[in-house]
Amino acid sequence: QKEVEQNSGPLSVPEGAIASLNCTYSDRGSQSFFWYRQYSGKSPELIMSIYSNGDKEDGRFTAQLNKASQYVSLLIRDSQPSDSATYLCATSGGTSYGKLTFGQGTILTVHP
Amino acid sequence: DTAVSQTPKYLVTQMGNDKSIKCEQNLGHDTMYWYKQDSKKFLKIMFSYNNKELIINETVPNRFSPKSPDKAHLNLHINSLELGDSAVYFCASSPARGAGEQYFGPGTRLTVT
């Protein structure tokens, strides 16, 4: 079982729709959770972090965490073509103390 | 002002050669990392240094040797390159050890022929 799992996609949504990206993790000791965005040929950049159960909103982005279900999600409202990228879920803490463990990423395509 | 820079951006070399990749950060961060991203885009940590001290050394062949001359620089030397070493190598930094907010360099695409 992979430590951090994501559906590799591609996930295709129309412009203006809500894109929903999901991630599950296996280490119950994980304490911190992150979403990175990676455009093709570029480096990952942090877009959201979440540390406690519930929702965290930042502009068009909402991160959701459910530690009991070991589940993290990212919602992108009013999706734009510029949101087309690979979204990487990452965890730290537990057996991943001091480092990030990444999922394989979900490719998101937003079509006009 | 590039926060995390790497050189070279592209590296094409033959099997058996030795090569180095350099990384510098001007963010004043204490911790630096090397990651490998394979052809399937899976990003995996290789090494981490905190204030010039090696703190994470994942299961990486000992042909890979990191060096941190100071906390702003982290270099990666690879001996006896193999085809399987072909990947994109990213350097990253964070304000402190264990911080999930990491800043990545532009990457070095290594191709071994």
Image: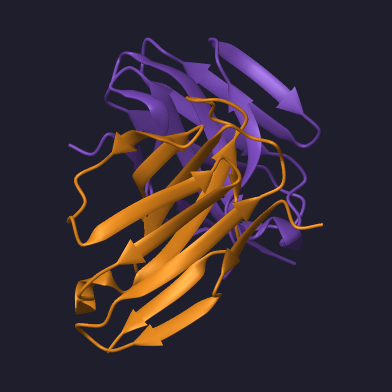
Chain colours: A purple, B orange
- At horizontal 18% and vertical 55% (from top left) the residue drawn is B62
Residue B40 visible, this orientation? no
Q: Residue A98 versus residue B70: which sits nearer the camera? A: B70
Count of picture labels: 0
Q: Residue A25 versus residue B83: which sits nearer the camera? A: B83
Residue A55 visible, this orientation? yes
Query: Horizontally, is A45 left or right of A90 in the view?
Result: right
Q: Residue B45, image x and y in percent?
A: 36, 45
Quadrant in which residue B47 is drawn: top left
Q: Residue A99, image x and y in percent?
A: 41, 32
Q: Residue B1, image x and y in percent?
A: 82, 57
Query: Horizontally, is A8 left or right of B112 in the view?
Result: right
Please say if B43 is above or below B63.
Answer: above
- At horizontal 47% and vertical 27% (from top left) the residue drawn is A72
Query: Horizontally, is A58 left or right of A12 in the view?
Result: right
Residue most extreme to the front:
B69
Please say if A80 is above or below B84.
Answer: above
Quadrant in which residue A103 is drawn: top left
Q: Residue A82 versus residue B30: which sits nearer the camera? A: B30
